[in-house]
Amino acid sequence: MAGLSGKLNRLVKAADDPELTVYAYRHLGSGLSSTPGRDPGGFGSRVRGIRKQLLPILAEQGVPELLDDSDEQKLASRLFQQASLNLFVHRLQSQKPEDFRAILAENNLLLRAIAVDTIGRRHLHLEHDLIKCLNDPRSEIREVAHIALVRVARGTDFGPIPGSAQSGIARSIEKWQHWLALQNGESPDSLGKGDAIAAAGESGKIDPAKAVNLVLDHGNRELQTALPAVTQLCDELIKAKGDEQMSVLARLRDDKGVDNTDALALAIPKLSAGAAQREARDALAQRLTRMTAKTLRDKLQDDAVEVRRAAALACGRKNATEHIPDLLQLLDDPEVAVIQAARTALKELTGEDFGPTEEAGRRGRTSAAAAWRKWWKEHQDSRK
């Protein structure tokens, strides 16, 4: 297939049609047909024209003989789109910095991710745009934006750490903004000027002393290094097999001590997806049902995704209606898994379900959160 890939790449390059390339990329996996009346640029027909050139190339490889017509179209579509993607990535290497802003506004996840990654690899001075991406609803964009910022900043790193709660993300964004203001200020006094403020993405004046302290103080972003005892318990659970693993899991679920909680949270992402991971998540949720109301509220704001998720489920399991306002806040969590856990708990506590679904986008999540809050505002007095 190596020769086939090369021919496809040459074919797409020969077309030399940037609009066609972007069209094919945006419709990755959706086939080559266009919806009548929704193809103002005529891109669909142009893609089908390219497909006619693709099929003889496929025939040379004997591929269509093994496929029915539907599979043949899907394969032709995928191969063309892969070649288009390669060309798209190549063209990003020569795009002007200002051209990236339009790409960052796209709904397509891969399109945005590749653009953000390219900004970092090219060390483009689009720090303000990358900082905005740290608040993206998709964790994939937040993570690649973080990496890109570290590259552009030549190793400077203010986070956020993976899985941070919204408060942790907000702290990191504040530090990045003040760092950027310092980079753009010729002197401490210039930090109060409009250009530095615009670069930091803020309104009002920036206090130079606060900016310097925020940038130098890493106290709000600990490295989350696990204690040796926690690491040992975590490794014990991961390495155990069968009944032995279930025995270790039961001990971590039932024994007293914060190390057991931390070990479970540390181990869950490292366990293979499946029964073992589900059992570990259930064990952590059961463990948190024994927490006091104050401790459970703290766990709902923990930096670890698995802890926030388990704490939300624990609220539902122990019928902790006093935590409904806290669960409503979790509907704005940056992690989908935490949002879904909050939704599950709210359903158990109220008997209602306003979503969001796991597949919901930013608008769907915002709408669902608003519906939940509206319901709570109307019914909270009757539930006190």
Image (tube, rainbow, N blue to C red):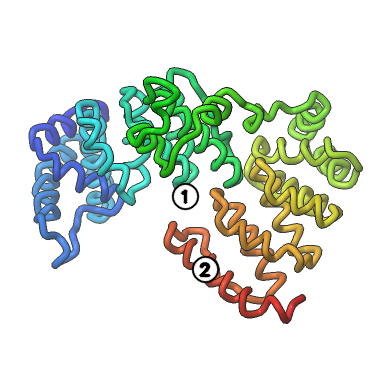
Q: Quadrant of the C terminus?
A: bottom right
Q: Rate crowding at label 2 as few (under 14), some (14 to 19) or many (20 or more) other CA atoms within 10 Å.
A: some
Of residues 200 and 370, the one drawn nearer to the viewer in this rendering = 200
> What residue does disc 1 label?
137
Amino acid on which the number 2 mark rests in the picture: Ala
Contact? badges 2 and 1 (CB < 8 Å): no
The secondary structure type at the circle numbered 2 is helix
Q: Which mark is residue 370?
A: 2
Single out the mark in the foreground, 2 or 1: 2
Spot the residue most to the front: 189
**Relative height, residue 26 to residue 117 (above, below):** below
Amino acid on which the number 1 mark rests in the picture: Pro
Residue at horizontal 41%, vertical 20%? 187
Q: Is residue 48 visible?
A: yes
Residue 312 drawn at (x, y percent): 70, 57
**Relative height, residue 130 to residue 364 (above, below):** above
**Relative height, residue 37 to residue 46 (above, below):** below
